Image: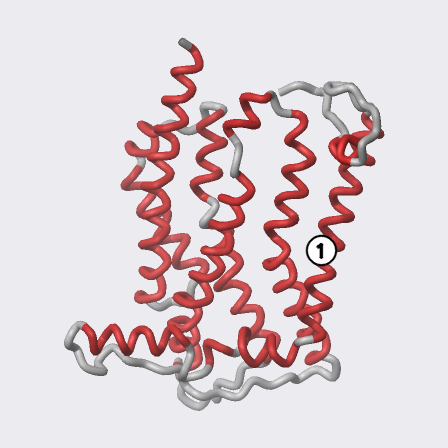
Amino acid sequence: MPLDQIDVDKLEEGQDQVAGKEMSFLEHLEELRWHIIRSLVALFGFGIILFIFQKWLFREVIFGPTEPDFFSYRFVCRLSEAIGMGDNLCFTPPEFPKIATGFGEAFIISIKASFVMGFIVAFPYVLWEFWRFIQPGLYPKEQKAARGMVAICSTLFLLGVLFGYYIISPFAINFLAGYDVPGVQNTPTVSSFINYMIMFTAPAGLIFELPIIVYFLSKIGLVTPEGMKQYRRHSIIGILLLAAMITPPDVVTQFLIGIPLYVLYEVSILVSARVQKENEEALR
């Protein structure tokens, strides 16, 4: 990778600049600073908008999986009827109050939830800003190979978040809210509920980036398809352990995230094989 980098923003502004002109270390820092500033502006912008519409955010999005008419519950019930099992697979979350114990907890949680959601919504733009910074430092061949990377990464991340929201959250909430200990009343705070919702969704979004991680590791030769196939059995154990760490101790929920993780692992093997083939053709 070349050490020189073109100031893309100046080129777009139409200033005279020769392609390939080297930038000093301070110029690199200045360029990076503006990319970070624009990313933060997008994050805070979406966060502020969501904070303004926090009633809709909490009612329709955050507390959505606690409602009996949530999409996932209706879908499972319809699926149960479609396969001839009647309402045997139907389930709805138990009713439970959500309380705020601290004087300013409701306000703090509103801010936290708004900006976490703001980051999720702004993720594609933040990733695009990061790509704009590193792209000029790549050779044309490398740029061509990484074309569409921002769209792929953003899509995988959002798919992971949606998977956590529509698949993991309903089953996890049903298990945790319905778990009883004799003599103990389960009355979760809003803060704990938000933290668990973040745990059910954000890690799933990052986990879905596995094929992209394998792509870059294969590019530099740290990962090969043969090695991934050799350690397939070990990966299954690792996937089950990871699923147990990010989900409640519910076997159904653990398998719900474990199966997609295994599918992503198999897809990553195909990605690694393709990268290896490209590397071998480049050496001929």
Seen from this angle, which residue lies furthest top?
284
- In depth, the one of 179 and 38 nearer the eye is 38
Q: Is 235 placed above or below 14 here?
A: below
What colour scheme was applied to this rendering of the protein? secondary structure
- In depth, the one of 235 and 225 nearer the eye is 225
Q: Disc 1 designates what residue?
A: 42
Look at 52% across and 38% down and name the residue there. Answer: 148
Provide the secondary structure element on which disc 1 rests: helix
Look at 70% across and 79% down and name the residue there. Answer: 105
Horizontal and vertical percent for residue 86? 19, 81
Q: Is 101 placed above or below 264 here?
A: below
Horizontal and vertical percent for residue 255? 31, 60
Seen from this angle, which residue lies furthest front?
14
Look at 44% across and 15% down and name the residue there. Answer: 282
Pointer 1: residues within 10 angstroms few (<14), some, or many (20+)?
some
Q: Is residue 180 left or right of residue 34?
A: left
- Amino acid under label 1? Ala
Number of numbered discs on residues = 1
Look at 23% across and 82% down and name the residue there. Answer: 87
Of the 4 image quadrants, the one containing the N terminus is top right
Of the 4 image quadrants, the one containing the C terminus is top left
**Quarter residue 221 falls in:** top left
